[in-house]
Amino acid sequence: MTQKIVEHKDIARKTPIEIFPDPKIAIVLTYQHTGAQNAPIVSVGDTVAIGQKIADSKERISAPVHSPISGKVVKIGDIYNSCYEECSEAIYIENDGKKTKDKTLQPIAESELKNTANDVLLKRIREAGIIGMGGAGFPTHVKLSLPPDKPIKNLLVNASEGEPYDTADERLLIEKTANLLRGVRVICKILGNPQVTVATKVNKVEAIAKLNEVFGKEPNTKVVAKHLTYQQGDASLLQKAILGYETPPTKRSYEMGTIVQNVATINAIANAVFEGEPLISRVTTLNGEVAEPKNLLVKIGTPVSSILSHYQVSTTDLRQVVIGGVMMGHTIPTIEAPVTKRTSSIIVFSKSKYTPIKPTTACIHCSSCISSCPVSLHPILIYNAIMKGDLEKAQKLYLKDCIACGTCSYVCPSGIPLSGTICASRH
Amino acid sequence: MSKESSNDLVVKSAPHITGTMTKTRLMLYTFVALLIITVVTAVLWWPVTTPTEGQIAAFKLTNVWALPLGLIVLINAGIAVGISVGIDAALHKVTADSELNTMSAAVFGLIVTLSYSLGVPAMTTGSDVLPVASLSAPGAFFYVAVISLIGLVLFKKLAGLAGRKYVNPAATAKLIVLLPFIASIFLAKEHFASYTEGGLSLPLLAGPLGWGTAPNFLAIGNNGLASFATYLAGSYANPAVTTPVATPDNISSLLILTKFHGWTGGASSLAVIIVGIGLFVVARKYIKWRITLAYFLSIAVMSMIMSTVYADQDLLLRLLFEVFIGSSIFLGFFMATDPATTPFTGIGQIIFGVGLGVLTVVIQTYMNFFGGSLLALIIMNLTVPLIDRVGIHKPFGR
């Protein structure tokens, strides 16, 4: 019995992707993935080209970052990082407008794919700095480098995009369908031709039509459109909904023979392999209390403030800016924070339209948080244990199994910050 | 969890949108549901004045007003809601710790009103029996006021401040206030101590129930002449317009459509069921419907067991009584589901409902305590911390 969340997608899902102008100054965070931190490999004063690697790490679980524009490194300093909700190191690049391109990554012809070694493809994915763009930020080449004794039976393409307001993936499904098929072929080559299931929601009508048209003739591939809830966009819950089994929280999905990939990540893989383009831009949705919702192909490192001012979003009336989805994403304290590889959306809320509806009051024991938890936890009991300082009890109630979907806080009639408190105490 | 940053942007933990259900809205829905039941009862009971002129004369009653029963219901509601909301507001004003919960207090007021028993049974003809004073005006007004006062202050506010409400406030206050009259109000035998038609004295459920044709089914409690069916008709029929007739149609219609004695909220079982299910639908996921379902199922099963054990002439008589008696039908929908005093988990709610149903039938049968659900509810409320411990379920994938 999971809770339905209002989607707010009607206009945004019909709005084609618009190319956002390159920023005058790009602020590229060196640490955008999950894993070991990167260090800059350029210095202030250096000239960099579009797609040039500017920060990297020698650790296995890492992914480099690249310059999204051509120009000069003018500063290396801290800026707010929406991936980690704290300030971290960034490389500031001043645009010289020359659009000179780095040619390190050469395109691989589609016809050559079957003759290309998996190692080459995995190295390409790593060198292109590709990470899970659905929000997790885990380096994709690590996820796809699997032990030989764990054969993969299924590739599950997560095209469910359940976060309210977000439509970036949905537009990719509509506008970049052929590119996504190329990306899927790359992953299939690496994984040894698993069964491909593209899982989407029945209300993504236009996307389903395009998917059926483009993926319909592909062998071992099916498009499944279901009534998925927002919560079923979670990799484990999606596997349950589409493939029918439950993955224990102690296991990774590859141990169950499945790899789940998000649409934006697959698009980036196709760009990296066939266009030689590292991950320097992404599609992000600008939505919320804005005059016109947008889906923008934006350079990573573009300050949020540039996007807001370009579309005349009043900064004096800004109340809250949410990066990466209103259910699971983070608020930013400053609009100077840049777009990252994980910025699937920028949702804006204004002061003028704000109506406080739910003050936090005492729990009335309605237990709706328990009955609506998609992973069958007891949020209020975990919350009570945390508030009493009894972390041991919270652990026993499987605190760590929380998927941070935010449903408990959403449904709570007493406005108790259940999800926020539980997530904060997991770290 | 939120703070204003230097340039005034709100920084807070996810999620950043919220559902539309609030405590006040949930209480408002419940209030409206209870108000509908109050109005339905008032309308159904308007034509009836109990005690009747005849009863007033027979009982030589001096302090009883002959008011329409429906009017008494509305006045009771006004008193209970007024006192509850008023005290809630007053406490909020004088003590900083007391949250202002107007809607919640109003709901409590209506629960007190609807769980209060009114109406003198049609067959009552004796002179020294029922506590007529509590069943009619103005005595009812006094007791409703005292129950509201004690329930709100002791069992809602003080218990809330102590950290948790352990027992249903309306049920506990009613039991405490009416405890001095326990024999006359709750114990069914006293209802009929001088029921002259048969001269019976013990209407026990721990015996065969029937229509009164075969020798064994003549008795209520094996020792009288009137049957259980006659007892039901005599208890619930409209004293103003009908002579109690124990026919299957009449008994079903009384118990399901309109009773003229007993819990105010149980006057029409059908109204309670329709409004109760309506509330479950409107406020779905916020009302513990599993308790109601488990309660009525276990009541039904227990009735059938008892029917078999005592070799009833007609299983339906016992079933109708146990399920549709006002204390059962109203409590099952609107008091057993009180969020604060019931278990958190789905399994716990089912255990709670089953326990409540079993206890209710046992209490009514063996303690001869009609309206035994009230005592059963308080007992089950006290087991909630325990049930919450056993009701914990495993998470996804474990």
Image (cartoon, coloured by chain):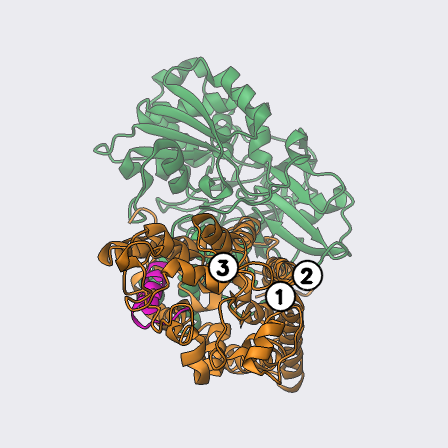
Chain colours: A green, B orange
Residue A232 within the magenta-colored segment of the rendering:
no
Contact between labelled residues 2 and 1, with CB atoms less than 8 Å apart: yes
Name the amino acid, label 1.
Pro
Q: Is residue B175 above or below residue A405?
A: below
Residue at the image point whose x is 37% and y is 61% from the top: B228
Q: State the residue in front, A374 or B291.
A: B291
**Identity of the residue drawn at 57% across and 40% down:** A67
Q: Give the x, y percent position of residue A62.
A: 41, 45
- Disc 3 residue type (three-letter): Pro
Q: Residues within 10 Å of mark 3 (few under 14, many from 20)?
A: many
Q: Alpha-carbon distance for marks 1 and 3?
A: 55 Å
Coordinates of residue A121 in the picture (x, y in percent):
38, 27
Q: Are marks 1 and 3 on the same chain?
A: no
Residue at 60% of width from left, 57% of height from top? Answer: B33
Nearer the observer, B380 or A412: B380
For label 3, the residue is B244
